[in-house]
Image: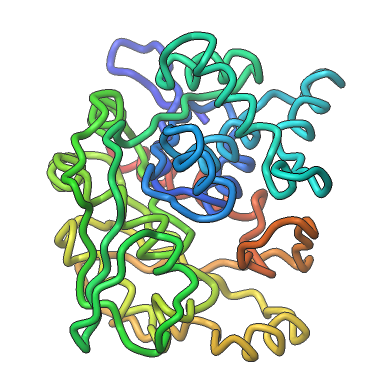
Amino acid sequence: MVSQRKNGTKKHDHFVCIGGGTGTFVVLRGLKLYPNRLSAIVAMSDSGGSNKRIRDEFGLLPTSDIRQCFVALSEDNTGGAGLLRKLFMYRFEKGNGISGMTFGNLFMAALTEILGSQEEAIRQTGKVLRTKGAVIPVSFTDTNLIATYEDGTTVSEEHFIDEPAHDGTIRIRRVSLKPEAHPNPEAIAAIDAADVIVLGPGDLYTSLIPNLLVKGIDDALRRTKAQIVYVLNLMTKYGQTYGFSAADHMSALETYIGKSVNIVLLNTSRLSPQALTLYAKFHEYPVVNDLPRNSYFRVVKAPISGKQLVQKSKSDTLVRSLIRHDSDALARVLMHIATTQRGKL
């Protein structure tokens, strides 16, 4: 969609998506079908699966979330581009030492060696995939996520927070980054230039909030004139948001960015009974809407969940979401929000 400048010329809306993992992938894949300017700000504290090996064996910052954003934003207009997308998402299932690794992560590791800079390797990977939009690491600081729970327990590294060995019903009291992470100036600039900022969906404490912990990101979100839309997760997460309602999610966000959210987007579609049965085995359930009718934010309800159960690679050792938001439906609602807001200007 386009908006009208005061001098009569037109400009595209600038959507900035903040998060990581499959949630941001889903948002970007839908929004790229519209003539907007797109930027994805991605968390850089992941320490599980392929990312752990990238960090431990190559001494690099994690690249899985960056890879997924690149694939989501890559152009569809040629068969070659489609093949590259499949190649970057391919996870090896055979080979000693390589099983479980993705081609995309190995490509970026090799390109870093060639170019001598991971920052430049990320930039050039976007050119290879001909992405429609920018993928921006929130920080280049080598840092780890630390979670402190209500019982006083402290857990270090995102992977152990995401898949807890402890009692996952105990709530997280706070999370932090150690050492303190300095912001990528491009991330701050993108927030400052945004028309619409999309937070989530994705794991609250390991995909979304790690971005907000980077010094300066919270301040940028507090001062932005953009509409901030929070896409609420479909399901709770054992070890992170066990028993969380919609209001609990909002309360957690307010801890880090205050009352900055303008719109909360909720799903109204019926979720797959088969998926819900499988989720229940892991103590995970649909997020209950208990948001107040009168608040500083507006609640938008729409049928935005996907209908298909997600299958993962046999060599993927991480726990993945079975149901996700529908990219096209989510993008339509976000575009409507942008259009409606533009009409008020």
Q: Quadrant of residue 251?
A: bottom left
Would you say 257 lies left or right of 335 here?
A: left
Q: Quadrant of residue 314?
A: bottom right
| Viewer can see residue 150 | yes
Residue drawn at the location 65% of the way across and 32% of the way down: 104
- Residue 52 at what x, y percent from top left? 50, 48
Above or below, 59 against 91 in this view is: above
Where is the C terminus found, in terms of image quarters?
Answer: top left
Would you say 307 lies left or right of 15 here?
A: right
Q: How is the image coloured?
A: rainbow
Question: Is residue 129 or residue 157 the one in the foreground?
Answer: 157
Would you say 325 lies left or right of 248 here?
A: right
Q: Quadrant of residue 132?
A: top right
- Residue 252 at what x, y percent from top left? 25, 71
Residue drawn at the location 40% of the way across and 90% of the way down: 169
Q: Residue furthest front?
A: 96
Would you say 91 lies left or right of 206 here?
A: right
Above or below, 339 against 203 in this view is: above
Residue drawn at the location 76% of the way across and 25% of the way down: 84
- Residue 63 at what x, y percent from top left? 51, 37
Question: Is residue 87 or residue 277 the one in the foreground?
Answer: 87
Picture mark count: 0
| Viewer can see residue 251 | no
Question: Is residue 137 or residue 17 the one in the foreground?
Answer: 137
- Residue 91 at what x, y percent from top left? 75, 44
Residue drawn at the location 63% of the way across and 43% of the way down: 30
Above or below, 34 against 51 in this view is: above
